[in-house]
Image: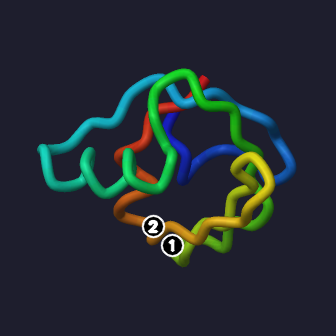
Amino acid sequence: MVLSNADTEREVTLIDISGGAGIRSKLYSMGLVPGTSLRVLNRNGRGPVIIALRDSRVVIGYGMASKIIVG
């Protein structure tokens, strides 16, 4: 499943990122690497996705969130 389809308040684990080196680099620099646990705080249709990552909140655009594979 991709992050943009995950249920709100659900804790998931990042499995992979389907995209090129640019998107991988951007997400890795934000701490989003395979094996990371995160929780979806807010997901509004095709708008941004807000996640809890460790002690921070991170906002990810819908397109980027749809390239993050979680389980």
Between 33 and 49, the one nearer to me in the picture: 33
Q: Residue at x 58, y 71 (%)?
A: 59
Judge whether 48 appears above or below 57 on screen.
below
- Quarter of the image for the C terminus: give it: top right
Q: Which label belongs to residue 46?
A: 1
Q: Residue at x 55, y 22 (%)?
A: 35
Name the side, left or right, on which 25 lies relative to 51: left
- The residue indicated by pointer 2 is 62
Between circles 1 and 2, the one closer to the viewer is: 2
SS label for mark 1: loop
Label 2 crowding class (10 Å Cα cut-off): few <14, some 14-19, many 20+?
A: some
Q: Residue at x 60, y 30 (%)?
A: 36
Label 1 crowding class (10 Å Cα cut-off): few <14, some 14-19, many 20+?
A: few
How far apart marks 1 and 2 lie (CA) works out to: 6 Å
**Sequence-wise first label, 1 or 2:** 1
Between 18 and 30, the one nearer to me in the picture: 30
Q: What amino acid is found at the position of numbered circle 1 in the picture?
A: Arg
